[in-house]
Image: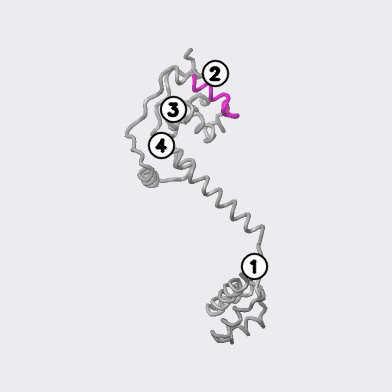
Amino acid sequence: MSQSLNYAILNQAIALIRDGNMRRARALGFSEAELRALRRMSASDLEELAREKQVICRVSVDHEMLLARIRRLTQDQDRESKIDRCLELGASVTMMGKFFGLTPNDCSTRRSLLGLETRQGRQALPPEKEEHDAWHRWQSISPDAKDPTYAPDDLNGMMALAEETGLSLTAIWSLVKTWVNADPSKDPDEDAPKPSADIDRRGGSPCRA
């Protein structure tokens, strides 16, 4: 183990020296004098040095940087998984653009990779009872259910509602904006179904019983 570690770090230092990247070579822990000495050594000398049984090179861990990179990778993986799940739940191009910055071509490529069919035209509104049940369930799922500023951005809540009800994510997004917005003409999602005329605009809840 010590020989492998010695060999790996010494060769990395030599490669950096040859590239003229002295700053990174020093960052490995070598002093200027050591780097100059390594630079003068022949290949056979370096091989002999690397075969030393004693550990002459050690690895140090930048814990803060390592944890930051792990968090970043985890966030990236979570984002990719969420994008795929949104498409599987029927998110429109407009919706994917708003929440993830994806282009129509991005969405088309991802749908193809996921084996999803591209839906043409507007999606039909759910039956009256399904819409009514969805509204009541939304009140318990989203902490911002009645807030027109934050409710339409509660993607996790809308995904949960889509999974529970079987309605498309695009339809859920359109309904949420209708429920909390007294002026449905402001709906920016061209792919979403038109708001139902049977929504009670006064109280922000379905008037269907």
Residue that carries the numbered disc 2 in the rendered image: 203
Q: Position of residue 187 (x, y in %)?
A: 45, 31
Q: Position of residue 114 (x, y in %)?
A: 38, 43
Amino acid on which disc 1 is placed = Val
Amino acid on which disc 3 is placed = Gly
Q: Which residues are magenta?
A: 133-146
Q: Is residue 140 above or below residue 103?
A: above
Residue that carries the numbered disc 1 in the rendered image: 59
Q: Earlier in the sequence, mark 3 or mark 1?
A: 1
Q: Crowding near pointer 3: few (<14 within 10 Å), some, many (20+)? A: few
Q: Earlier in the sequence, mark 3 or mark 4?
A: 4
Q: Earlier in the sequence, mark 2 or mark 1?
A: 1
In the image, residue 145 lies in the stretch drawn in magenta: yes
Main secondary structure of the magenta stretch: helix
Residue that carries the numbered disc 3 in the rendered image: 166
Say what secondary structure mark 3 lies in. Answer: loop
Q: CA distance from mark 2 to mark 4?
A: 28 Å
Amino acid on which disc 2 is placed = Gly
From the image, state whether disc 2 or disc 1 is nearer to you.
1
Image-based side of 74 in relation to 121, left or right: right
Q: Earlier in the sequence, mark 3 or mark 2?
A: 3
Q: CA distance from mark 3 to mark 4?
A: 15 Å
Residue that carries the numbered disc 4 in the rendered image: 92
Q: Earlier in the sequence, mark 4 or mark 1?
A: 1
Front-most of residues 206 and 72: 72
Front-most of residues 47 and 88: 47
Say what secondary structure mark 1 lies in. Answer: loop
